[in-house]
Image: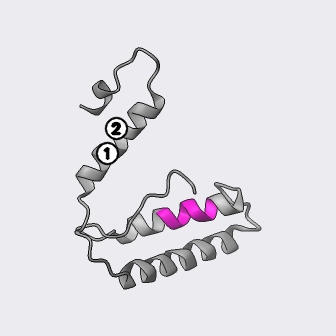
Amino acid sequence: MCRNIKVLANFEPPASDDEVRAAALQFVRKISGSTRPSRANEAAFDAAVEEVTASARRLLDSMETKAPPRDRETEARKARARSAKRFSRPGQRASAATS
């Protein structure tokens, strides 16, 4: 999966329409292999983004879970820690990047 597409389910407050559309755009870019479609493909690209956005919104709105909602700041902190660990150079302190 594209690393730029983030989990949007089970957050409080729920994912915004902008977040859902951004994930849809990343998905369509990934599967089309293009970040900017040609003029000939622009309408199809834009339609795909809108369809994926609508489908993703329906999915998120219909999902049920018993797990407590996730906190955005906590999840962002965890992501920064994973990134610091993944991209740190030997001898570099990963904890410095998360403060």
Q: Identity of the amino acid at label 2?
A: Ala
C-alpha span from label 2 to label 1? 5 Å
Q: Position of residue 13 (x, y in %)?
A: 23, 68
Please tell me how crowded label 2 is: few (under 14), some (14-19), or many (20+) other residues with Cα within 10 Å. Answer: some
Considering the whole magenta stretch, tell me its main secondary structure.
Answer: helix
Q: Quadrant of the N terminus?
A: bottom right
Q: 53 left or right of 79?
A: right
Instruction: Give the residue at mark 1.
Output: 78
Residue at position x 66%, y 69% in the image? 45
Q: Is residue 59 above or below residue 91?
A: below
Do callouts 2 and 1 mark residues in contact (Cβ within 8 Å)? Answer: yes
The region drawn magenta spans: 23-29
Q: Quadrant of residue 95?
A: top left
Q: Is residue 60 above or below residue 90?
A: below
Classify mark 1: helix, strand or loop. helix
Q: Is residue 27 above or below residue 47?
A: above
Q: Position of residue 67 (x, y in %)?
A: 26, 71
Instruction: Give the residue at mark 2.
Output: 81
Q: Quadrant of the C terminus?
A: top left
Q: Position of residue 4 (x, y in %)?
A: 50, 52
Q: Quadrant of residue 79?
A: top left
Q: Is residue 33 magenta?
A: no
What is the number of the mark on residue 87?
A: none
Residue at position x 47%, y 62% in the image? 22
Residue at position x 34%, y 20% in the image? 93
Please tell me how crowded label 1 is: few (under 14), some (14-19), or many (20+) other residues with Cα within 10 Å. Answer: few
Q: Quadrant of residue 80?
A: top left
Q: Is residue 51 above or below residue 79?
A: below
Residue at position x 51%, y 81% in the image? 55
